[in-house]
Amino acid sequence: MTDTAWIDAALNSARPQAVGALLRYFRNLDTAEEAFQNACLRALKSWPQNGPPRDPAAWLIMVGRNVAIDEARRSRRQEPLPEDEAISDLDDAEERLAERLDGSHYRDDILRLLFICCHPELPATQQIALALRVVSGLTVKQIARAFLVSEAAMEQRITRAKARVADANVPFETPGAIERAERLAAVAAMIYLIFNEGYSAGGDTAEIRGPLCEEAIRLARLLLRLFQSEPEVMGLTALLLLQHARAPARFDADGALVLLDDQDRSLWNQKLIAEGLALIDKAMRHRRSGPYQIQAAIAALHARAARPEETDWTQIDLLYGALEIVQPSPVVTLNRAVAVSKVRGPEAALQMIEPLSSRLSNYFHYFGVRGAFLMQLGRNDEARIAFDRAIALANTSAEAAHIRMHLDRLVRDSAPRNAKAGK
Amino acid sequence: MLYAILCYHDEDFVGSWTREQDAAVMQKLAVVQDRLTKQGRLGPVARLLPTTSATTLRKDDPPVVLDGPYAETKEQLLGFYLVDCGNLDEAVDVARDLGAANPGGAYEIRPVGLFQPGGEPK
């Protein structure tokens, strides 16, 4: 690793804590961010010469604070900036500061930062953008790219979010227990949304949107360290890890989506799977189930199957049944139907999704799944109608291409049969 | 004399490495490890999963199971076991058995992410 790569990694990992602490001092998001930015610039100059400090976060907080205070003073009295050496000679000061940065401050600072990003006044799109900018430190350009919008539009979205937070007069005190629990759910949902933004990308955009998945995992781990005994946070982290482990196998060389059954499982990231399985194991000991844990348990059953035939579909069917109870949604039922088709056959599965048709009449996956069941039952004409509808509703070119593959198979399969019938 | 070399680092920092950066570090380490292996001096090597996957058994009376790593600083690391377990429950049970035989202190239970058994050092 080069010097700059090390420094980038160190700045990156110190960021949530440092920005969180600076926010505690300045009580203003922009000032805190600017102070952190200035501290990073100093670090890029000082660290290659003096070596990295023992506690990078403490160093950045200290320098960020000093520079901001100096700047405020300078703008008032037109005083010159202090010499760099005066600031970089921080050894003793750093130690004293590090002592004061005890565990509780660390926890509260990061929580406050996450809670502000998930402020109930902000719509989800703004929450995500703000968290990626402020907590993760992605540039506006990077975020804009990942969300496939212009840089100006993303800049505006973030500026609006910050203005709303400022208008809402967010209290900077540590939230109480009830508020904390409510906000925790909002933060978890925000992290899951970030992940899905990356995960739902098509093969053509996976490369630029994929990093969102890694960022979401980083945030989930951060949240888990703040809430070590919260089984749903363990479940969320496990879910993201287990799903992301399949990323290297999800697209073929042409960028087309590869279904779970057809994926080359040797490409799955075993390191992430091990961590995900360990976390879901840990969560289940609490016997306080929840939607993230159940979904993680389903992902775990897929991860444990070395070959698709070894998948425990009966258990997956049961888990989706449990998920339908805690989080009823037609999409959950649709997913359950896939498991049912494996356990009890396509007829039973088709019956299960029939009542969903009105509620999912604009949902790509509904018609893809329906078409697949019909195809398995040999009802090819109906299958074709379903697949055509799916293509019309596809969100990405990869989705459309995938359905077209089914249609091609239908044409191939039905051709000889029709010929025979014609005899 | 056998020596254990215990690895400490900031896991936020190590966790923020890209896959390429991580692989580059592991490759450099492998060079050193290979040399030791050829000399017949290297025993098992393990890379632990992050502390978020840790569970701690405080060997009080009765023992208490807590989520997260062992965070106290007044006790010192005195030894470790590597045990093959089907799941965390089994691992906690093993720790309980050990704890009953030797109460006081704590066990931190951490899944092992990467394990190289190595040879038996000469």
Image (spheres, rainbow, N blue to C red):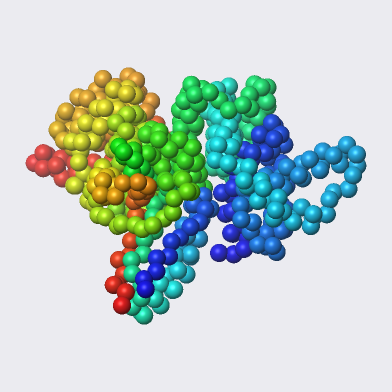
| Rendered image quadrant of residue A151 | top right
- Name above or below for residue A202 compared with residue A28: below
Instruction: Please give the name of the residue rendered at 38% of the width and 25% of the height, measured from the top-left corner.
Output: A362
Residue A199 location, x and y as percent? 43, 41
Instruction: Please give the name of the residue rendered at 40% of the width and 35% of the height, measured from the top-left corner.
Output: A229
Quarter of the image that includes the N terminus of chain A: bottom right
Q: Is residue A169 left or right of residue A333?
A: right
Residue A55 location, x and y as percent? 61, 52
* Outermost residue to the left: A423
Tell which of A119 and A253 is nearer to you: A119
Instruction: Please give the name of the residue rendered at 39% of the width and 52% of the height, measured from the top-left corner.
Output: B49
Residue A363 location, x and y as percent? 37, 28
* Outermost residue to the bottom: B39
Q: Is residue A201 left or right of residue A152?
A: left
Quarter of the image that includes the C terminus of chain A: top left
- Name above or below for residue B66 compared with residue A252: above
Q: Is residue A373 at least partly visible in the picture?
A: no
Tell which of A173 and A146 is nearer to you: A173
Instruction: Please give the name of the residue rendered at 32% of the width and 19% of the height, measured from the top-left corner.
Output: A358
| Rendered image quadrant of residue A49 | bottom right
Q: Is residue A125 left or right of residue A289?
A: right
Residue A395 location, x and y as percent? 43, 35
Q: Is residue A71 at least partly visible in the picture?
A: yes
What number of labels is visible? 0
Tell which of A296 and A247 is nearer to you: A296
- Name above or below for residue A368 compared with residue A11: above
